[in-house]
Image (cartoon, rainbow, N blue to C red):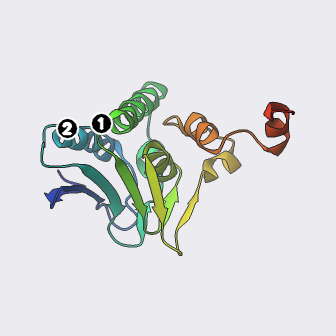
Amino acid sequence: MKHLIVSKADGIGWLRFNRPPVNALNTEVVLEIERAFDWFATQDDVFVIVLTGEGKAFVAGADIAEMSGFTPLQARVFAQNGHRALARMASTEKPVIAAVNGFALGGGCEIALACDIRVLADTAKIGQPEVNLGLLPGFGGTQRLARLVGPGSQGADIHRRRD
């Protein structure tokens, strides 16, 4: 793998994002994520998988330089690859933990949302800043976030049981 450090030790599978300076997601990284989870699935001595980032970021979003040159068809393929990679991650039978050590923005937030458990450092920053530009998260983050957080307090009032 070129941009991921994938290893295992003592029953733990490790996936470290390693694309300095901020571990931005490009096509190669997205495809490597899927391959890494295919590999983890074959490792009977791996019982849990931990994702983290090298350096100051977990994953600070998509590689805007790469994306700015996409044709509409290339953008669609990139989004489809991202959906497939995160679906592969989310559907693995082994628990997946996001150890968010820094920025988890955009696609990084979506990766964390696809994990079973998220543990954030005190200095971590997580969010979907692309919405401020009128863009939607491209890898299913709007659905995962809403399912994880649940309805707001007003919506919760509607669903409360009344005795």
Where residue 91 appears, x then y in whole percent?
A: 36, 33
Q: Specify the quadrant that holds the C terminus.
A: top right
Q: Nearer the viewer, residue 122 or 129?
A: 122
Q: Percent x, y for residue 27? A: 33, 41
**Quick one: label 1, few (<14), some, or many (20+) residues within 10 Å?**
few
* Residue 157 or residue 70, whichever sits in front: 157
Q: What whole-number distance in Å separates the C-alpha atoms at marks 1 and 2?
A: 8 Å
User: Which residue is the site of mark 1?
Assistant: 93
Q: Earlier in the sequence, mark 1 or mark 2?
A: 2
Q: Is residue 59 left or right of residue 19?
A: right
Q: Name the residue at 52% across, 69% down.
A: 124
Q: What is the residue that sits farthest to the top in this orientation?
A: 73
131 lies above or below 58: above
Do residues under tags 1 and 2 come within 8 Å of each other at their CB atoms?
yes
Q: Which residue is mark 2?
A: 41
Q: Amino acid at mark 2?
A: Ala
Which residue type carries mark 1?
Glu
Q: Is residue 114 left or right of residue 134?
A: left
Mark 2 residue crowding within 10 angstroms, few (<14) / some (14–19) / many (20+):
some
